[in-house]
Image: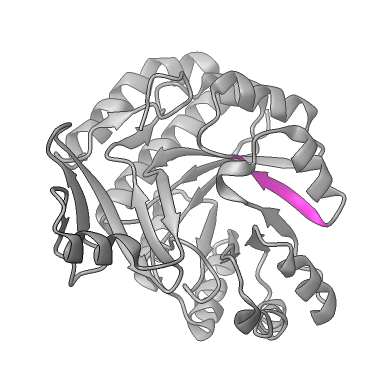
Amino acid sequence: MKKPELLVTPQSLSHIKALIEAGADAFLIGEQQFGLRLAGEFTIEEVREATAIIHDAGKKVYVAMNAIFHNDRVDALAPYMKALAEIGVDGIVFGDPSVIIARREADVNIPLHWNPETIATNWFQANYWGKRGATRAVLARELSMDEIVEIKENAEIEIEVQVHGMTCMFQSKRPLLGHYFMYEGKAMEVEKRKNNRNMFLHDPERNSKYPIYEDLNGTHIFSPNDMCIIDELDELFEAEIDVFKIEGVLHTEEYVVAVTECYRKAIDAYTESPDAYFDIKEELLAKIEEIQPELRPLDTGFFFKETVY
């Protein structure tokens, strides 16, 4: 069988090196001017340096351009893509069709990965964007396992699925919640607002804390739990899903490295034989449970429709 690509979201150049050692196959990086909800901020020069490190290791690097662009930001797209082409990145992740137009204007041929977040829910969409230059579709995290398998069976381009990490529940292009809860005095409040990557929306009724941060692209609220299906990967293997993504946003570098090592072992074991994977999957889950932050329980997301946010 073809091994699925193990895609990770590094926070720094040193983190990239550690993740290469941990077994990652590909890396998604970028800067908030162009990309949404990035684990780390990489300037164009850092993208250049990161690409050299990643390519030297025989791995791939993708750059996030999946923000929603207003008129005042579209002029920067083509020059940025020209710089990425000169660097030699392996792909661009996009959701806004303006990126396709900008790529044409820039006269570059960097592969495109279509990622419109919650609306990537059927193979007709995937194939539509495939005919317009996309080589990969990043599926919505709200899909069930059966829906994912059905899309893969009918898709004409690669399919990427998140298998671990936080799920974004809400986005506003404004610093909405910080303003609302600070000035309206509501019962739910934003904690540690001064640190944009360490805030929580606290719901005492459900005893849940929802991670939230605000950046150039607005307000983002994440699920109170982390998705983890390291012990439920067999159907994705059988369906030959092309890419398994580990979302490392708002987690420590050490946590992401440890999780990557576990998924690397799972992929390699299943490639050896399904039985080898079944023999170690519970052990791998236990390793992740040991390092899981207390405030963020693990669940299986929407794969089996047992989670409602």
Percent of width and height locating residue 170:
41, 49
Percent of width and height locating residue 191:
14, 59
- For this rendering, which residue is in front, 298 or 219? 219
Percent of width and height locating residue 152:
71, 29
For image coordinates 45% across by 21% down, the residue present is: 232
Query: Is 138 one of the magenta-colored residues?
Result: yes
Quarter occupied by the C terminus: top left
User: Which region is colored magenta?
Assistant: 133-139
| 262 sits to left or right of 237 | left
For image coordinates 61% across by 40% down, the residue present is: 139
- For this rendering, which residue is in front, 181 or 280? 181
- The image's colour scheme reads one colour
Q: How many marks?
A: 0
Q: Eyeballing the image, is 196 above or below 19?
A: below
Quarter occupied by the N terminus: top right
Q: From the image, give the main secondary structure of the stretch colored magenta.
A: strand
Q: Eyeballing the image, is 271 above or below 52?
A: above
| 304 sits to left or right of 132 | left
For image coordinates 54% across by 23% down, the residue present is: 144
Q: Eyeballing the image, is 303 above or below 5?
A: above
Query: Is 226 one of the magenta-colored residues?
Result: no
